[in-house]
Amino acid sequence: MRVRPGRGSRPRTRRRPAHEDAAQAFVVAVDRGRYHCVIGDRQVTAMTARELGHRRVVVGDTVSLAGDTSGAPGTLARIVRVAPRTTVLRRSADDTDPVERAIVANADQLVIVCALADPPPRSRLIDRFLVAAYDAGLDPLLCLTKADLASPDDLLAGYAPLGTEYVVTGRPLTEEMLAELRRKLAGRLSVLVGHSGVGKSTLVNALVPDAGRAVGLVSAVTGRGRHTSSSAVALRLPGGGWLIDTPGLRSFGLGHIAPDRIVQAFSDIAEGTANCPPGCTHLEPDCALDSWVAAHGGGPLAARLDSLRRLLRSLEGLGSGDSAAEDSAPDDGPPAGTAPDDAIAADTIAADTAAGDTLPEGR
């Protein structure tokens, strides 16, 4: 047998380098296959190494970098490892698609930003965010903006049984107005979510003065906000903590979450399922939730049950449920003072700019 000589001088092997001296970094933004990371006081641009395969890296990931990590202009490091994630905020394209998409990694708080007016609040989109927060193991924080235009009382009454923490802000965003929100964000890795026009970028610019996030207006014709942030970016908060701003979402699919976990996320009415028949989908006429809600006074609980069933019908692909990609028409479902459309259409969460100067503690 004739042995053909190799084309190179180094023997071929399947063993990959261990990269034991790789530097730990924190991903603050993503831009078309380039990852902006921070190591200590410098920012480094990197790409994924071949050994990572098809594993996706998202904002909030802690990674190991090899190669040139000087951060000098024109240099490019390689992401050779991604540390195990403590939490992952996910969504799906729609409610019937079980394929999940990671949005942000390692966050510990989900800040649900909702305007009280202009545009009006959408309670069922809030419910979707709450389900995603509970499923991901994040602490939800309801941030109600534009309290100078409308009262938060009706909306807060609908979520009071959940015991969800909340802050209320109004214009002008003075330091006194922001004090409570700053306290709840301090030392934490928080993600801001909400649909367009609720004032997320205005909040970010007030909390992080050098953030420079674009601010837009709500359309007088459609009543919807216009997209001003096209990317997710992690920003370091003065005094400690990180804030991840995301683009205004127009949908939030929950197809990757099992129906029973969605029911458990509605903790204010979940105990009413104890008397349901075996295998109850909570959409049948003999579901015990109807009698349980009626026995507890109906009102906001009835609206919550309606929101739960709309989600369950959407997951089943039934036409009578709200879709994660289309607005629903107004009806009597949500609590007073809220608008029923929960879906507002899906934007790709990517990132094109970076900010921040140190690694979060423990990362």
Image: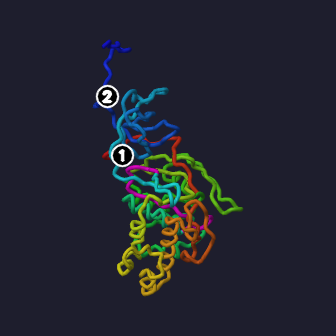
- Inspect this view and state whether residue 239 appears: no
Q: Position of residue 169 (x, y in %)?
A: 52, 64
Residue at the disc numbered 2: 14
Q: Is residue 280 above or below residue 70?
A: below
Q: Left or right: where does residue 122 sit relative to residue 98?
A: right
Q: Residues within 10 Å of mark 2 (few under 14, many from 20)?
A: few
- Residue 155 x, y percent position in the rendering: 52, 73
The kind of residue tagged 2 is Arg
At label 1, counting other C-alpha atoms closer than 10 Å, the crowd grade (few under 14, some 14-19, many 20 or more) is: many
What is the C-alpha distance between the residues marked 2 and 1?
35 Å
At 30% from the left and 46% from the top, the residue drawn is 362
Nearest the viewer among 156 and 125 is 125
Per the image, the residue denoted by label 1 is: 360
Q: Nearer the viewer, mark 2 or mark 1?
A: 2
Quadrant of the rendering where the C terminus is positioned: top left
Whether residue 341 is visible to the viewer of this picture, yes or no, is yes
Residue 244 image offset from top left, x and y in percent: 46, 50
Q: Amino acid at mark 1?
A: Pro
**Residue in the foreground of this view, choosing between 29 and 357:** 29
The stretch in magenta equals 101-122
Quadrant for the N terminus in the image: top left
